[in-house]
Amino acid sequence: MSGRAQSRSAARLAAVQALYQQCMEGTALAKLLNEFHQHRLGREIDEDQYADADVDFFDDLVSGTLARGDEIDALLEARLAEGWSLARLDRTLLQILRAGSYELMARADVPVGTAISEYVDVAHAFFDEREAKFVNGVLDKVAKAVRT
């Protein structure tokens, strides 16, 4: 994996973590981005070395996902199986889907396959295969809706 690809992967994982924190704590965007810039991206925390992340890409994922939240949630809600709602989803899983949806909607520079497989990888960092397959399926439906 190239350095750019690795730094974008790190940015995606950090973006999901930032979105989760914002969801749980309601942290203001500027404070949230600053906290991640200062203390998380490319730092060592509890003996875990965080990879250098593409900071501009991270900022775009977080701020774009939050700015287009209602649009993203409507897009996701329409692609969940009957009887399912966003409220039923695990909060981390929901942030993975939101960030992935934003990237598919707004980042035409990222190929569909790359975006989906990256968020499946993020899902694997937190969940088992079942949830990763769920992310793959939902983001595939989102991609068909937003990319021609």
Image (cartoon, rainbow, N blue to C red):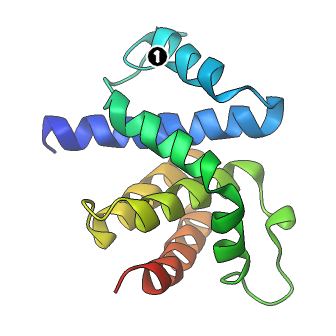
Q: Nearer the viewer, residue 126 or 18?
A: 18
> In the image shown, does 99 or 51 lie closer to the viewer?
99
Of the 4 image quadrants, the one containing the N terminus is top left
Q: Quadrant of residue 10?
A: top left
The image shows residue 108 at horizontal and vertical percentages of 30, 65
Q: Quadrant of the C terminus?
A: bottom left
Structural crowding at the residue carrying mark 1, measured as other residues with C-alpha within 10 Å and reported as few (<14), some (14–19) or many (≥20)? some
Say what secondary structure mark 1 lies in.
helix
Image point (52%, 83%), residue name: 141
Q: Is residue 25 visible?
A: yes
| Residue 5 falls left or right of residue 146 | left
Q: Position of residue 41 (x, y in %)?
A: 42, 20
In the rendered structure, the answer to whether residue 79 lies left or right of residue 146 reads: right
Rendered view: 148 above or below 59: below
Between residues 55 and 139, which one lies in front from this camera angle? 55
Where residue 110 appears, x then y in whole percent? 27, 60
Q: Is residue 85 above or below residue 128?
A: below
Residue shown at the point (28%, 34%) measured from the top left:
7
**x, y percentage for residue 22?**
72, 34
Can residue 127 be seen here?
A: no
Three-letter amino acid code at the position of disc 1: His
Q: Using the image as rendered, state which of residue 105 and residue 126 is in the foreground.
A: 105
- Count of numbered circles on the image: 1
Pointer 1 residue: 37
Q: In screen coordinates, is 87 left or right of 66?
A: right
Residue at the far left in the pictured view = 2
Q: Residue at x 45, y 79 (%)?
A: 146
Residue depicted at x 52% and y 48%: 64
